[in-house]
């Protein structure tokens, strides 16, 4: 498996730097992997809108849905397209802005200590074989650097506010590396 560089970037994936990140506070220890979903416009796949959102270049007037998002500054460490392509936006050594107000095991501000992975999808449409395979590979690569990270959905760390990755996501398809607790709500 390919290891992350000391700078937190996977050398064998497309890297597109997002300005929507900053330094992790304190020790910067990573201790959680958060699974999300995203599609822009909702339910549409394959375009550049998610990349444009994460890099601050989304044309807010390109679609009526985007107008309500005007000025939103968000990112994730990784984006996994439906065809299995993995794109990295934020080094894992930095804090991506993916979780918002959140809590995991009594720890507030999950962005401070988590890695965010966005799957191109919706809560209700099945994810692809390529996405499950890619996510399992990514989890394995992250385990080399951080050990087995517990997994949580966005809905687990922000219940009542978020629903992703949704009921269409099959947690049983994820193979947690040795030492990881698997999904931990």
Image: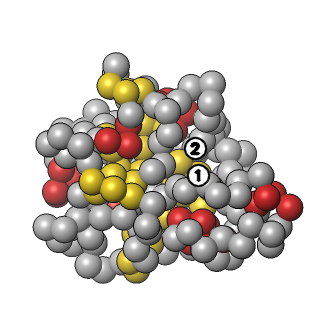
Q: Is residue 75 left or right of residue 57?
A: left
**Residue shown at 60%/61% (left/top)?**
120
Residue 155: x and y in percent read 55, 33
The vertical placement of 14 against 10, above or below, is: below
Q: What element does badge 1 sit on? A: strand
Residue 55 placement, left or right of 72: left
Q: Locate residue 145: give its quadrant.
A: bottom left
Cα–Cα span, label 2 and label 1: 5 Å
Quadrant containing the N terminus in the rendered view: bottom left
User: Which one is nearer the viewer's eye here, 131 or 58?
Assistant: 58
The residue under label 2 is 165
Residue 112 visible in image = yes
- Residue 78 falls in image quadrant: bottom left
Compare marks 2 and 1 and give the one earlier in the sequence: 1
In the rendered view, tell whether residue 159 sits above or below residue 116. above
Callout 2: helix, strand or loop?
loop
Q: Name the residue under label 1.
A: 37
Q: Residue 157: image x %, image y %? A: 47, 30
Query: Which quarter of the picture shows residue 39?
Result: bottom right
Proximity of marks 2 and 1: CB atoms separated by less than 8 Å: yes
Residue 36 lies, in percent from the top left, at: 53, 48
């Amino acid at each position: 498996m390919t290891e992350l560089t000391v700078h937190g970037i996977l050398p064998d994936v497309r890297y597109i730097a997002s300005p929507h990140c900053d330094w992790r506070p304190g020790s910067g220890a990573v201790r959680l992997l958060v699974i999300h979903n995203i599609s822009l416009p909702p339910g549409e796949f394959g375009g550049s809108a998610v990349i444009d959102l994460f890099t601050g270049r989304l044309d807010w007037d390109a679609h009526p849905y985007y107008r309500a998002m005007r000025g939103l500054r968000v990112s994730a460490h990784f984006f996994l397209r439906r065809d299995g392509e993995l794109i990295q936006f934020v080094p894992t050594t930095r804090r991506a802005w993916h979780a918002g107000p959140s809590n995991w095991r009594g720890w507030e501000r999950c962005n401070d200590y988590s890695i965010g992975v966005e799957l191109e999808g919706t809560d209700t449409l099945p994810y692809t074989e390529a996405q499950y395979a890619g996510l399992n590979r990514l989890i394995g690569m992250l385990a080399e650097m951080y050990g087995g990270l517990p997994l949580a959905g966005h809905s687990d760390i922000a219940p009542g506010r978020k629903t992703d990755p949704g009921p269409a996501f099959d947690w049983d398809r994820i193979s947690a590396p040795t030492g990881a607790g698997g999904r931990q709500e």
